[in-house]
Image (cartoon, rainbow, N blue to C red):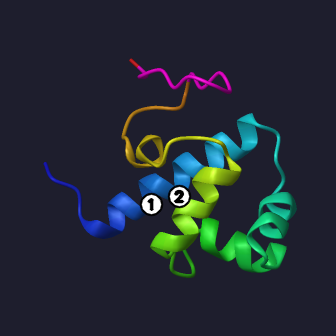
Amino acid sequence: MEQSAQERVKSILKNIRIIREQKEYSQGYLAAKLGISQNAYSKMELGHTLLTVERLFLIAMVLETDITKLYQQGILENYDGGNLEESA
């Protein structure tokens, strides 16, 4: 079954959160790197505010990951900080 746009965005936001936590980056750290408040970052990560394409690219750069990895489904449970492994 094909995902809706809203489901895809939720998946991307989940992947961002997982990578951020694996790298032990706080929301405040990412917010500072993006030039926004921690509260604004939290709302974005929770899907309460829109994630712009520009901000998505910036987040990928801060997380030092390829932007395509943020879009993939069924990954990140075994994220090792450098390589993303497909979960079973």
Give yes or no for residue 76 being in the magenta stretch: no
Per the picture, the main secondary structure of the magenta-coloured stretch is loop
Left or right of 36? Residue 57 is: left
The residue to which callout 1 is attached is 10
Residue contact at pointers 2 and 1, CB within 8 angstroms: yes
Question: Separation of disc 2 and disc 1 at Cα?
Answer: 5 Å
Give yes or no for residue 86 being in the magenta stretch: yes
Residue 58 spot, x, y in % from top left: 61, 62
Residue 51 spot, x, y in % from top left: 52, 74
Chain part drawn in magenta:
78-87
Q: Would you place residue 41 above or below residue 22 in this image?
A: below
Label 1 CA crowd tier, 10 Å (few <14, some 14–19, many 20+): some
Q: Which mark is residue 13?
A: 2
Residue type, mark 1 in image: Lys
Left or right of 85? Residue 3 is: left
Residue type, mark 2 in image: Leu
Secondary element under disc 1, as helix, strand or loop, is helix
